[in-house]
Image: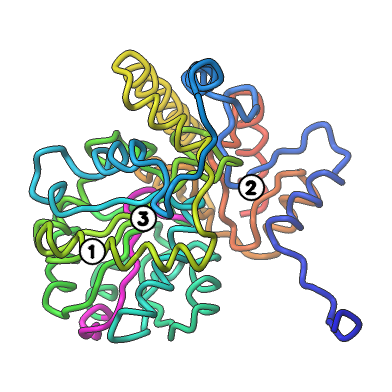
Amino acid sequence: MFAQLPEAPIDPILGMAQAFARDPSPDKVDLGIGIYKDEHGEVIVLPTVKAAERALVEGQSTKRYLSSAGNPEYNERTRGLLFREGSDAHARARTIQTVGGTGALRVAADFIGKFGTGKRIFLPDPTWANHPAIFGVAGFEIVNYPYYDIATGTLKLDEMMSALADLRAGDTVLLHGCCHNPSGADPSAAQWAEIADAVARSGATPLVDLAYLGFAEGLEEDRQGLAILAERLPEMIVASSCSKNFALYRERTGALTVVGANPGQADTALGNLLPVVRTNYSMPPDHGAAIVAHILGDATLRATWEQELAAMRNRIRDMRHELVRLLSGNNRRDYSFLAGQHGMFAMLGISGDAVRRLREEWHVHVTGSSRANIAGLTPRNVEHVAQAIAAVS
């Protein structure tokens, strides 16, 4: 079998990492890989994570198996992060731990494929590159709906709503909960309500990918879209991740949450979800989930973590505003839209040739779609990056 295999394609993100590593320039800047970096360009371990790990080393008494649902304390704390405790949505929600947010999406795909009445999923255009890959390999028919206008840096709301009018019962529609990847453009509360009403009329199921909770405006603000959807819809599914907001990238700590019309239906959905996990990876690893559960369960550590999260969010926001300020004299393109967007990513809206020139002439590495990771900007490199963008745009 192996002798007949074709040459495997190079993963585009891995290829970017290799190209960056080969770049000999001392001025090179990595704005491609989707990971948070501090003001020194370092990928840090949060102090609260270190504190939780020390507590686990000292106090963890067993490494016995957990169930396919994972760490129960983590699941309850995550449910409380997504939906305000005491709310109707919180009562109707059930959460399991997954292998990262990507694992949550794949489990959701398998669950919908097994129990749903249709295998058509609507994905925003543009979206995270792994979305069509995951649902394509799971056998879904993919329908792209307009989301973002790269030329103007704004949502294509009218076109989006027109496309969502084609949703029907049995369909799934994927929505980014906040910090849309790759554009950074999020719906307002009023627009979330309009989207929720359209989905409710169709009978389709929303699947919300929430990988950046707390990275837009704050924990409460960033779950506003979820609350609006839950208020207007009987069912929904949420895939979430702790990679960014706890900086637990390699620990692969995610969750899948199902919201039913009532607590009983949510329990039934959870019961049918667990066999899907069992036949996939059986059960998730515990370390990252135990860290999160410990932090969220300790009042002092949680308060400190929220400060750490705010510091990451504010640093990204400050870099956005500084980049816009430095580009304000560029007469060929107005980049002011970047300041009003959220999270780590932005689409510069430049050509493929301009992306090549950024990399080859200025040693600034972004993806081929012109997606830039704003978290890769620092006080030391932002002026260089602004000069590079101005030169090629």
Q: Which residues are magenta?
A: 163-181
Q: Which residue is mark 1?
A: 236
Label 3: few (<14), some (14–19) or many (≥20) C-alpha neighbours in 10 Å: many
Residue 317, horizontal then vertical, whole percent:
42, 33
Query: In this rendering, would 341 be left or right of 17?
Result: left
Q: Earlier in the sequence, mark 1 or mark 3?
A: 1
Q: Nearer the viewer, mark 3 or mark 2?
A: 3
Asked if labels 2 and 1 touch by Cβ distance under 8 angstroms, the answer is no
Residue 196, horizontal then vertical, whole percent:
16, 65
Q: Residue at x 20, y 82 (%)?
A: 165
On the question of residue 46 being in view, the answer is yes
Q: Nearer the viewer, mark 1 or mark 3?
A: 3
- Label 3 amino acid? Leu
Q: Nearer the viewer, residue 267 or 48?
A: 267
SS for tag 2? Answer: loop
> What number is the disc on residue 33?
2
- Farthest right residue in view: 3
Report, in whole angstroms, how far the alpha carbon at label 3 lies from the one at label 2.
Answer: 24 Å
Q: Is residue 179 magenta?
A: yes
Q: How many marks on residues?
A: 3
Q: Residue at x 87, y 86 (%)?
A: 4
SS for tag 3? Answer: strand
Label 2: few (<14), some (14–19) or many (≥20) C-alpha neighbours in 10 Å: some
Please identify the quadrant where the C terminus is shown: bottom right
Q: Main secondary structure of the magenta part?
A: loop
Q: Is residue 125 magenta?
A: no
SS for tag 1? Answer: strand
Quarter location, residue 219: top left
- Label 1 amino acid? Met
Q: Which residue is mark 3?
A: 256
On the question of residue 154 being in view, the answer is no
